[in-house]
Structures are given as C-alpha cells and as structure tokens.
Image (cartoon, rainbow, N blue to C red):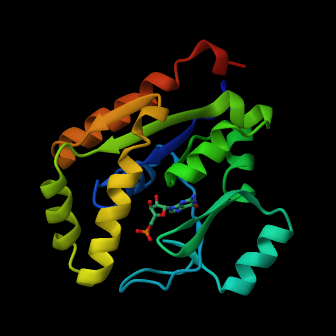
Amino acid sequence: MSQRTGVLLLVSGPSGSGKTTLCRKLAQEGEAHYSISCTTRSAREGEVHAKDYYFLSRKEFKSDVAAGSFLEHAEVHGNSYGTLKSEVLEFLQRGKDVVMDIDVQGAAQVRTCQDPLIVASVVDLFVMLDREEELRDRLSGRGTDSDEVIALRLHNAMEEMSHADSYTYRLLSKSRNEDYRRFKSLLTTERMRVSRLV
Ligand code: 5GP
C-alpha cells in the first residue's frame, strides 16, 4: 500500500509541443500510469489500439458517453476524444500516479470535477513553445499529416495557447532532455505535498 494518494497530472499544449512524448516517457520509466484515451479519429501509421488510443466508432463513443464511462470528453480537430474513468480512478485510489495528455477543454472539465479523489490529486501543466515558426517546423517535421491537417493544427494550436494562463504550471519547451528533466521534477515535487499523505 502506498503511503500517499496519487497525483493526477494533466498535460496540455499545442500539437507539436512534445507533450505526448513527455507523458509516454514518464509511463515507460514506470513513474506513472498513462491514461489511454478513446478517440474517434483514425489510427496513424504505427499506432496500436489499446496502447496509443482506444480507437472507437462514433457510435461506440456515443454509447460510452451515454453510459457515463467518461471522466471528460471533448471535440478536438473534428474528432471526439475522452478519458475513461476506469483509466484514472482506480489507479489514484491505489496511490499510483496518472498522467494524461489532454486538450484545454478536457482539462477544464477535470479541474472543475467535484469527485474528491480528483480534486485532491489534480495538477495541471501547459507545455508551451515560444515561437509560431518553431511550432510550424515541429508539426511539419512529424511527416505524418497532410498540409491541410498541419494548417488546421497550427490554427488550433494558437487558439489552444491562448488558454495557457488557466494552468498552474507552464513548461516552456527547450530540448527533449531538458523538458523531460523539468517535467519529472514537477511530479517528484508534487509527490511531497503534505495533503497527499495518508
Ligand atoms: P492527437 O490526435 O494528435 O493524438 O491528439 C489531438 C489532441 O487531443 C491533443 O491536444 C491531445 O492532447 C488531445 N487529447 C488526447 N486525448 C484526449 C482526451 O482523452 N481528452 C481530451 N479532451 N483531449 C485529448
């Protein structure tokens, strides 16, 4: 049994900010459970069902919404995304930390959630890039999306960044290693909060 309750780390930021890589690495190192989201978007090349996402049809997604299975859900880039309660609550109860890659609308929903377990565990971080060109380069460099999709993501990224002030923490992205070092130190610090000790 853990001597503390878990940390629920919400990580938002524009596409191309590297937030998914940060979250995944934390999970790979065994530091936290990565909450696998549901989405109605198609899998990109190399993405695996139940590892990267649960890829659902619109109908399946709707029925999960109706069943109350989601902690939050939102429409992002024309597709539905949602976090299953089962990916979060039982881990937190066991004192396991959970990391979530989530858009600004979803983060707002989790932040206002009344569940005492969520209220006690939530920490939110926005991963930011300081230049639009840097963001454009990173989005094009991924090589998996069409020009049209990149343009849409860039537009959405600028919108997304306008919500950065709603977050408690901000990580201004520099290099992968430095970003990860600072990211992990946030979790290390949050684990020491006296209010989490049981
Ligand atoms: P992508 O399609 O590039 O994997 O993700 C697109 C956006 O959806 C990203 O901003 C990502 O943070 C967000 N996202 C991924 N999973 C969830 C989720 O479960 N809920 C919400 N609200 N957004 C999510």
Horizontally, residue 116 falls left or right of residue 17, namely right
Q: Quadrant of the N terminus?
A: top right
Q: Position of residue 92 (x, y in %)?
A: 68, 41
Closer to the camera in the image, 152 or 11? 152
Q: Position of residue 190 (x, y in %)?
A: 50, 25
**Measuring 63% from the left and 64% from the top, which residue is drawn there?**
82
**Measuring 31% from the left and 36% from the top, which residue is drawn there?**
171
**Measuring 71% from the left and 77% from the top, which residue is drawn there?**
61
Q: Does the image show residue 14?
A: no
Residue 195's quadrant in the figure? top right
Residue 163's quadrant in the figure? top left
Residue 64's quadrant in the figure? bottom right
Please determine whether, in this image, residue 66 is positioned above or below residue 44: above
Q: Quadrant of the C terminus?
A: top right
Q: Does the image show residue 168?
A: yes
Q: Position of residue 62 (x, y in %)?
A: 76, 77
Please determine whether, in this image, residue 89 is positioned above or below residue 24: above
